[in-house]
Image (cartoon, helix red, strand yellow):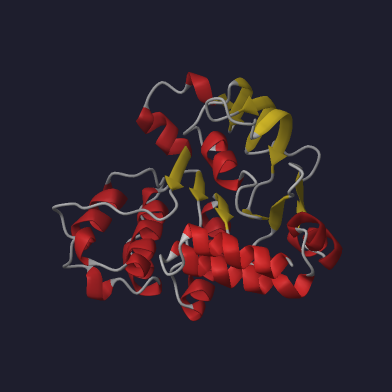
Amino acid sequence: MSKREKAPISLKNISFSYEEDKPVFKDMSLDLPGGVVSLVGQNGTGKSTLLLIAGGRLQPDTGTVEILCRDSRELASEEERNGLVSFIYQNMEFETEETIGELLSSIYENGFHVTREPDLLNKIIDILDLSPLLGKRTGEISKGEMQRTVIAFSLLYGSSIIMMDEPVFALETDRKATVLAYLNEYAARYNVTIYYSVHEIDLSLKYSESVLLFTKEGQILTGLTSELLTRENLEKAYQVPMDMLHQRENLYRHHMLGEVSEKDLSGINAKVIE
């Protein structure tokens, strides 16, 4: 982002805590870059909270959040907020009466895309491999299928900014690559900014222009992905040697899929650190 270019989202002197817990952020100011931006760091360092605050889903205790030069507190309605920022929550699950095919069409027809490209709906269905799901309802599909479906919803909705909290954790490796490559193509074509959190550093390196790197000490470093995600910076942020990071990434994915409990994850993590 050049000095003359306005940041899509600016956080100014924000502080936030959950009830009486230790503050997640304290008097923090940060300009979020545009383009495709990944959020990387250990679990519990504030990535999800930052997405929620920057996307207007949570309000800071103090300070201001400007989304495309609009104060998030002054957005008059949910529709107005959604036009600026749409949000994919972590591990989303919900049931609807409509089929997925009906939902996709309705979201595209009633969304915020300035122009309606006749082939965009079909292209997204094809890239995300949703054809087998069009006649099903959301309660009838797997976790990975749900992730691909809600990603399609967000792209068809047409907001200026899209927030995605762990959008590909349940996908197979080849599908992750396909989805993230298309997010970059989509962002460039429609001048959309996309922020997504991810625990797999290799994906961040390959499929994001810029990165927010969260450290255990509470810092958030921002810069070009290729320049910031060095061995030195990653080992400092994660506080483990580089060769252990992939073990942590794999453990966390299994935890998100429900294959490893929180208690087991903590125990295994302790052994990894030792």
Residue 141: x %, y % from top left: 25, 67
Query: Outermost residue, bottom direction?
Result: 174
Residue 213 shows in this picture:
yes
- Residue 259, image quadrant: bottom left
Residue 202 shows in this picture:
no
The quadrant the C terminus occupies is bottom right
Query: Outermost residue, right direction?
Result: 232
- 47 lies above or below 102: above
Residue 45: x %, y % from top left: 65, 46
Tell me if 76 is positioned left or right of 93 in this view: right
Residue drawn at x 69%, y 45% is 33
Residue 41: x %, y % from top left: 67, 55
Residue drawn at x 58%, y 63% is 267
How many numbered badges does the structure rendering display?
Answer: 0
Query: Outermost residue, left direction?
Result: 97
- Residue 20, image quadrant: top right
Tell me if 52 is positioned left or right of 104 in this view: right
Tell me if 6 is positioned left or right of 53 in this view: right
- 265 lies above or below 110: below
Instruction: Name the one closer to the observer, 81 or 58.
Output: 58
Tell me if 253 is positioned left or right of 24 in this view: left
Instruction: Name the one closer to the observer, 238 or 233.
Output: 238
Instruction: Name the one closer to the observer, 267 or 110.
Output: 267
Residue drawn at x 59%, y 30% is 21
Residue 255: x %, y % from top left: 48, 64
- 220 lies above or below 182: above
Residue drawn at x 65%, y 55% is 42
